[in-house]
Image (tube, grey):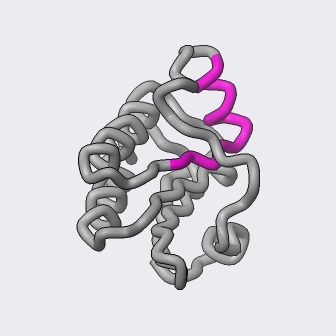
Amino acid sequence: MTLAVYTTVTTSKTAVATCCGEVDVGSCAKLIDALDEILTGGPERVVVDMREVTFIDSTGIGCLLHGAMAARSDGTPFIVLPGDATRSFLQASGLTAQLAYLAEPPPTNRAEACRGGAE
């Protein structure tokens, strides 16, 4: 399965990147490009919805860290909404302190996005 990344900005200026599929060395450029693009829009907060990610490797985690560092340099909160694959990797790697978790869903419909919502 490949990676699809759908981005939206809510009325509260929260930029949401919804990821569907596998985040690995072959697909990580899509995620980095999407994160870089939404950060240039000056959002008040960035949420990366990873609940529909079925696989993530160290390169994928590196993409999230890239986004988190870029957001922090602008003073923008960066929050990951992990699915099982992402949560397991973060916990096993000890990187939970570097990437903030969000327990509640962001204001977006992830199922709709993963079925082909606006990219």
Q: x, y percentage for residue 26? A: 36, 41
Taking the spot 24% from the left edge, 67% from the top edge, the residue there is 40
Vertical side of 76 occupied by 101: above or below: above
Q: x, y percentage for residue 74? A: 26, 52
Which residue reaches farthest front?
75
Q: Is residue 81 visible?
A: yes
Can residue 83 be found in the magenta stretch? yes
The image quadrant where one finds the C terminus is bottom left
Q: x, y percentage for residue 102? A: 66, 47
Taking the spot 55% from the left edge, 15% from the top edge, the residue there is 93
Q: Depth check: give the residue in front, 65 or 110.
A: 65
Taking the spot 37% from the left edge, 54% from the top edge, the residue there is 76
Q: Depth check: give the residue in front, 78 or 28.
A: 78
Magenta stretch: dominant secondary structure: helix
Vertical side of 36 occupied by 43: above or below: below
Can residue 98 be found in the magenta stretch? no
Taking the spot 55% from the left edge, 38% from the top edge, the residue there is 100
Image quadrant in which you'd find residue 92: top right
Q: x, y percentage for residue 21? A: 58, 52
Image quadrant in which you'd find residue 109: bottom right
Count of labels shown?
Answer: 0
**Span of residues in magenta:** 79-91
Q: Is residue 25 visible?
A: no
